[in-house]
Image (cartoon, helix red, strand yellow):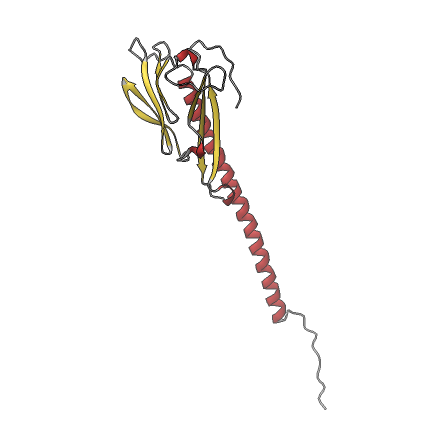
């Protein structure tokens, strides 16, 4: 009579190996998703920081231009035509001052000289075409609520509110198509209006 010996061999069955591979696959998918999420958020944060810095530089330049205006010939929600005195612009050869035009067109804000003619330069691009429903420029008299227009004398222009809105299309889904708003206020100093800067 034959006796069969049972071998107690150590090893994995096919079912155990398949189960282990399935579990490892699930863990790999979860881990890669977490890593991708982190990378996307990091990329979006980096993009937002760069755009914020770009907007702050543009606002600083706009502030520098508008704080020294001595006359305004046209003032709308998207454009201002103004004069800077010769004492502020050393390269200006006109005794009455040099004239400039700042305007928001589409997704850009440009600055150009109109007298003498200086080619337009882009101060910032990548703006929201509708500026998030906000006016790029709004003008107020000293009381802070009464609008100022060119029908009023320049010495009644106390404040210019500036709002730029950037459409942030980042690489991450959290910030995709998000609008970032950057407001500031300019108080022209050469018009004789005594007022303190306001916070908005």
Q: Quadrant of residue 18?
A: bottom right
x then y, percent, for residue 34: 57, 49
Quarter of the N terminus within the rendering: bottom right
| Image quadrant where residue 122 sits | top left
Q: In the visual, does 197 lie left or right of 137? A: right
Q: Which residue appears at 32% of the width and 12% of the height?
A: 97
Q: Is residue 182 above or below residue 47?
A: above
Q: Nearer the viewer, residue 112 or 29?
A: 112
Q: Residue at x 63, y 68 (%)?
A: 16
Query: Residue 90: x and y, percent?
Result: 34, 11
| Rendering coords of residue 23 (x, y %) | 61, 61
Residue that protrudes farthest toward the bottom in the picture:
1
- In terms of image quadrants, where is residue 64? top left
> 116 or 14: nearer the eye?
116
Residue found at x 43% / y 28%: 135
Between 68 and 3, the one lying in front of the other is 68
Q: Position of residue 147 (x, y in %)?
A: 44, 20
Q: How many marks?
A: 0
Residue at position x 47%, y 43% in the image: 171
Q: Nearer the viewer, residue 167 or 8?
A: 167
In the image, residue 118 sits, relative to residue 174, either above or below, namely above
Above or below, 60 against 46 in this view is: above
């Amino acid at each position: 009579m034959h006796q069969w010996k049972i071998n107690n061999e150590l090893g994995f069955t096919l079912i155990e190996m398949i189960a282990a591979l399935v579990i490892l696959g699930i863990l790999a998918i979860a881990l890669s998703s977490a890593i991708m999420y982190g990378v996307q958020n990091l990329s979006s944060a980096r993009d937002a920081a760069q755009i914020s810095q770009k907007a702050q530089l543009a606002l600083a330049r706009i502030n520098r231009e508008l704080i020294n205006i001595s006359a305004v010939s046209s003032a709308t929600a998207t454009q201002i035509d103004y004069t800077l005195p010769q004492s502020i612009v050393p390269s200006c050869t006109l005794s009455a001052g040099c004239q400039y035009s700042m305007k928001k067109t589409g997704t850009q804000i440009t600055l150009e000289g109109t007298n003498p003619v200086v080619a337009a330069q882009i101060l910032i691009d990548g703006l929201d075409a509708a500026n998030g429903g906000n006016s790029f420029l709004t003008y107020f008299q000293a009381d802070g609520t009464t609008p100022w227009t060119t029908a009023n004398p320049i010495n009644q222009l106390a404040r210019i509110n500036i709002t730029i809105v950037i459409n942030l299309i980042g690489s991450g889904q959290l910030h995709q198509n998000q609008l970032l708003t950057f407001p500031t206020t300019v108080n022209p100093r050469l018009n004789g209006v005594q007022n303190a800067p306001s916070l908005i």
